[in-house]
Image (tube, helix red, strand yellow):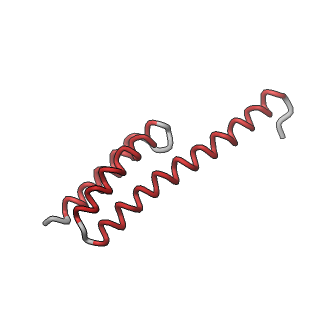
Amino acid sequence: MANTSSAKKAVRKIAARTEVNKSRRSRMRTYLRKVEEAIESGKQEDAFSALRAAEPEIQRAAGRGILHRNTASRKVSRLSRRVKAMSA
């Protein structure tokens, strides 16, 4: 348990940041799920628009430290490749 006042404040700050990060991660995953569902439905137009909405969310999560930037780029790349493959 934290003994000093600064350690107690740090515990409060960490708890607050954890809540914010959970919310941001959940929001990003929602956008990812929408793209996945659109791909499974087979409608390329829907998948393309869902991907266009998800891409800035993923990059924003990387900018906020929720994801590593390479991970974010990899996710966008793989999703866009799958959406593109739907037309073939």
Residue 74: horizontal and vertical position, in percent?
33, 49
Residue at 28% x, 50% y is 77
Relative to 36, is 21 above or below?
Answer: above
Residue at 83% x, 36% y is 2
Relative horizontal placement of residue 28, taking residue 36 as reference (left or right): right
Residue 29: horizontal and vertical position, in percent?
46, 56
In front here: 68 or 83?
83
Q: How many marks?
A: 0
Residue 56: horizontal and vertical position, in percent?
36, 44
Residue at 44% x, 36% y is 63
Relative horizontal placement of residue 20, taking residue 73 as reference (left or right): right
Relative to 68, is 29 above or below?
Answer: below
In front here: 66 or 27?
27
Residue 34: horizontal and vertical position, in percent?
38, 61
Q: Residue furthest left?
A: 88
Q: For the C terminus, give its image quadrant.
A: bottom left
Q: Residue furthest bottom?
A: 41
Q: For the N terminus, give its image quadrant.
A: top right
Residue at 78% x, 27% y is 6
Relative to 57, is 86 above or below?
Answer: below
> In which quarter of the view is residue 62 placed?
top left
Relative horizontal placement of residue 1, taking residue 33 as reference (left or right): right
